[in-house]
Amino acid sequence: MIVCSCNSISDRDIHAAIDWMRASDPETIITPGKVYHALGKRPDCGGCMSLFLSTMRQNDNLVVPAELRGLKEHRMKRG
């Protein structure tokens, strides 16, 4: 399914980019911008962003590295 019609990016492209980034660096934080960059594209109109994010969230490799989980709660307890 095409997710970003401006750049002809499919859901398969997004999942492949996420899987590649996670395999390359298990501790990286994966963002939509990094997915676009990995695909050699740049965001254009932004109309696809909600579908783009939804597609990203479906990927099991889209996780926050363990050492970064809970940082907000940790900061709130200190302050």
Image (tube, grey):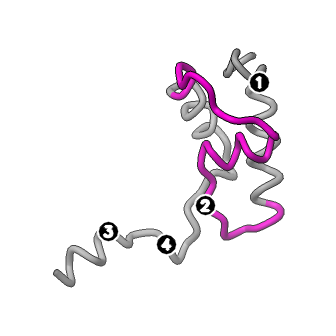
Instruction: Please determine whether, in this image, residue 35 is positioned above or below residue 43.
Output: below
Residue type indicated by callout 1: Ser
Q: Earlier in the sequence, mark 1 or mark 3?
A: 1
State the residue at coordinates (54%, 28%): 49
Callout 4 secondary element: helix
Can you say which quadrant of the picture contains the C terminus? bottom left
Residue tagged by mark 2? 29
Q: Earlier in the sequence, mark 4 or mark 1?
A: 1
Residue type indicated by callout 2: Ile
Q: Is residue 28 magenta?
A: yes
Distance of label 2 from label 1 (alpha carbons): 21 Å
Distance of label 1 from label 3 (alpha carbons): 33 Å
Q: Is residue 29 left or right of residue 14?
A: left
Residue tagged by mark 3? 72
Residue tagged by mark 4? 68
Pointer 3: residues within 10 angstroms few (<14), some, or many (20+)?
few
Magenta range is 23-49
Pointer 1: residues within 10 angstroms few (<14), some, or many (20+)?
some
